[in-house]
Image (tube, rainbow, N blue to C red):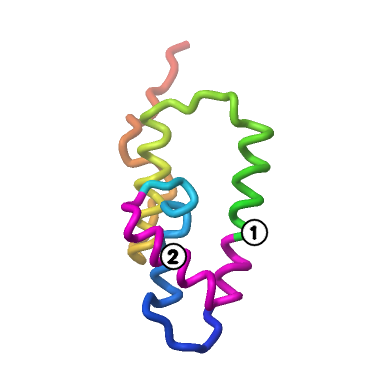
Amino acid sequence: MSCGEPHETDCSEILDHLYEFLDREMPDSDCVKFEHHFEECSPCLEKYGLEQAVKKLVKRCCGHDDVPGDLRDKVMGRIELIRSGQAVPEQDVTASPATPQES
């Protein structure tokens, strides 16, 4: 997604780190770059608004459920694989194989 205009911060960088911005998991100086980008790029601002709405909906529906740390780590690991263009394994590579049940 891009508005076709040149920006100080490229649209792809903004979209790759959108959730870090939404979650305020980046330095203030980076947040300022994002805010400036949104002021001049309506497609990215629209995407930001959509993702912000989804995040609020999920929080409202599921916000009181605790997520196990290992699950969060696995999900974040898969997101990073996808972002980097690497293949994502179909099964969890850290899970031990199922053992046959005895009769």
Residue type, label 1: Leu
Q: Please state if 61 lies on the left or on the right of 88 as rendered.
A: right
Q: Magenta span has 37?
A: yes
- Range drawn in magenta: 26-48
Residue drawn at (38%, 51%) of the image: 89
- Number of numbered callouts drawn: 2
Q: Magenta span has 30?
A: yes
Q: Main secondary structure of the magenta part?
A: helix
Circle nearer the N terminus (1, 2): 2
Mark-to-mark CA distance, 1 and 2? 16 Å
Q: Quadrant of the N terminus?
A: bottom right
Q: Please state if 69 lies on the left or on the right of 5 as rendered.
A: left
Residue 85, position in %: x, y? 36, 66
Quadrant of res 33: bottom left
For disc 1, the neighbor class at 10 Å (few under 14, some 14 to 19, many from 20) is: few
Label 1: element kind: helix
Q: Mark 2 points at which residue?
A: 34
Label 2: element kind: helix
Residue drawn at (38%, 28%) of the image: 69
Task: Please report contact status of discs 1 and 2: CB closer than 8 Å, yes or no.
Answer: no
Residue 59, position in %: x, y? 61, 36
Q: Mark 1 points at which residue?
A: 50
